[in-house]
Image: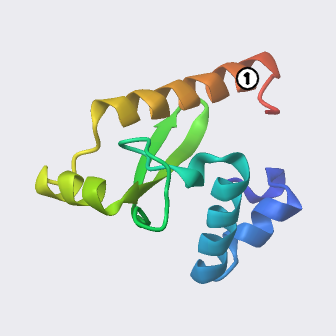
Amino acid sequence: MVIHESSASELHLAFAPLSEVGDKLAASMHSDGSGRQCGMCRKPFTIARKPRGIARVTHQGAAGVMCSTWLLCGHCKYKASAAGGQIPDSMLARARKSYNAYHTLQTQSGGRA
């Protein structure tokens, strides 16, 4: 991250304690709806199906670095760990699609996205 081009909120987040960053990430995921369902099976979280793990994909390219994050239910976390920690192709495709959309947005705005 280039500090002089960061907004005040990004600087605050970059230097925040890890627990505070986790809380902000969880609040952001719940507000946009991505934290209400499992990232692998897409089933909604309920009293019985709770978020038990996190899957992350980090992209680095011409648009910079971007991290896609999903919450996983216990069953999917177990399946992923049994598969050697491999993230399914469907999740990788969603992460690539998000990164490509960000790259397109950044290109169209002249790098100010």
- Side (left or right) of 34 relative to 72: right
Q: Residue furthest right?
A: 8
From the viewer's perspective, is residue 75 above or below residue 63?
below
Residue in the picture at 22% in, 46% down: 86
- Side (left or right) of 58 relative to 36: left
The quadrant the C terminus occupies is top right
Instruction: Give the camera-side residue of 5 and 95.
Output: 95
Instruction: Give the camera-side residue of 30 and 101.
Output: 30
Q: Residues within 10 Å of mark 1 (few under 14, many from 20)?
A: some
Instruction: Give the camera-side residue of 58 and 95.
Output: 95
Percent position of residue 76, x then y: 28, 53
Residue in the picture at 83% in, 63% down: 9
Residue in the picture at 39% in, 36% down: 91
Percent position of residue 2, x then y: 71, 53
Asked where in the image residue 101 lies, by quadrant, the reply is top right
Residue in the picture at 78% in, 66% down: 11
From the viewer's perspective, is residue 110 above or below residue 36?
above
Instruction: Give the camera-side residue of 38 and 60.
Output: 38
- Side (left or right) of 31 relative to 92: right
Amino acid at circle 1: Leu
Q: Colour scheme in the image?
A: rainbow
What is the secondary structure assignment of the residue under circle 1? helix
Percent position of residue 23, x then y: 65, 73
Q: Which residue is the site of mark 1?
A: 105
The quadrant the N terminus occupies is bottom right
